[in-house]
Amino acid sequence: MVTEEIRDELFRLQDVEYRDFQAKLIPGQDVDKVIGCRTPALRKLAKGLVKREDVGEFLEELPHEFFDEKQLHAFIVSEMKDFDRCMEEVERFLPFVDNWATCDQMSPKVFKKHRQELLEKIRIWIKSDRTYTIRFGVGMLMEHFLDEDFDPAYPAMVAELRPGVPDDHVGVSTPEPATDEYYIRMMIAWYFATALAKQYETVIPYVEEQKLDTWTHNKAIQKSVESYRITPEQKEYLKSLKRKKTKTK
């Protein structure tokens, strides 16, 4: 069975020290469910497995037991060249994605050639009630729609997402790293920081007019200031737009 072969190979690639390090990066991750395979090795393995006719057996056995199997799954899907099959596998896998690393590593190359079909799916994903489906949708919008296919309507779509924020005028403290809202809001901040680097004039009003919640607003500024793609003048202006946190009563 291909699944058993894959697991044997993953344990052959195991690096125990790397496993211990990696497990600490994923809050709530049981170290016993991390094998410890380095990313380059998983990518190489995925490129070979995607060509196998029986790889579907592994892809269909969800949920996976080990974190490394989830990572490998994401890399295999990312290598698929047929758009329809790739999208089918992405949709099958998304409900089982339960951590930021697997979510962010899944980036199908074939999506670049099918942006309009992808956009239709993104609109659905960002309205999901699943944390990592939303995060994946925003990530795909950031990756594929901030350059030649950019439309001012896209940052508006992202700004409308308000995970765990009942009122913009109520103080919003830094969210706990393990909360679902944190992983969505962090991706929103990442999106706007990247959007500022690529579409500054169109996106800066979202910061000036405070269209994001306090935490996400400030995090987007922080990430922008850390970026080499933002000019020194823009960085100074963005710093002046930081919002003070107010205490929630």
Image (cartoon, helix red, strand yellow):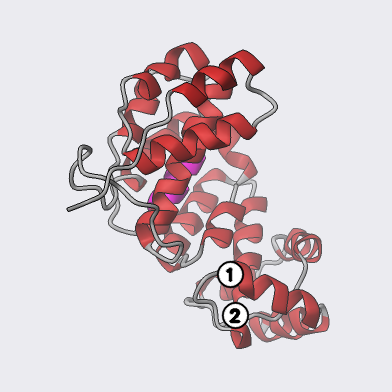
Q: Residue 141 appears at what percent x and percent y?
A: 47, 35
Closest to the observer, 54 or 142: 142
Q: CA distance from mark 2 to mark 1?
A: 7 Å
**Looking at the picture, which amino acid does disc 1 mark?**
Lys
Q: In the rendered image of this protein, does residue 93 appear above or below residue 3? A: above
Which residue lies under the disc numbered 1?
A: 70
Left or right placement of residue 18 versus residue 152 in this view: right
* SS assignment at label 1: helix
Does residue 210 appear to the left or right of 13 in the view shown? left
Query: In the visual, does 13 lie left or right of 92?
Result: right
Work out whether 133 lies above or below 118.
below
- Asked if the residues shown at circle 2 and circle 1 are in contact, with their CB atoms under 8 angstroms apart, the answer is yes
At horizontal 65% and vertical 31% (from top left) the residue drawn is 227
Residue 24 visible in the displayed image:
yes
Instruction: Tell me the magenta residue range.
Output: 134-140
Q: Say which of 112 and 172 sits in front.
A: 172
Magenta region's main secondary structure? helix
Q: Quadrant of residue 26?
A: bottom right
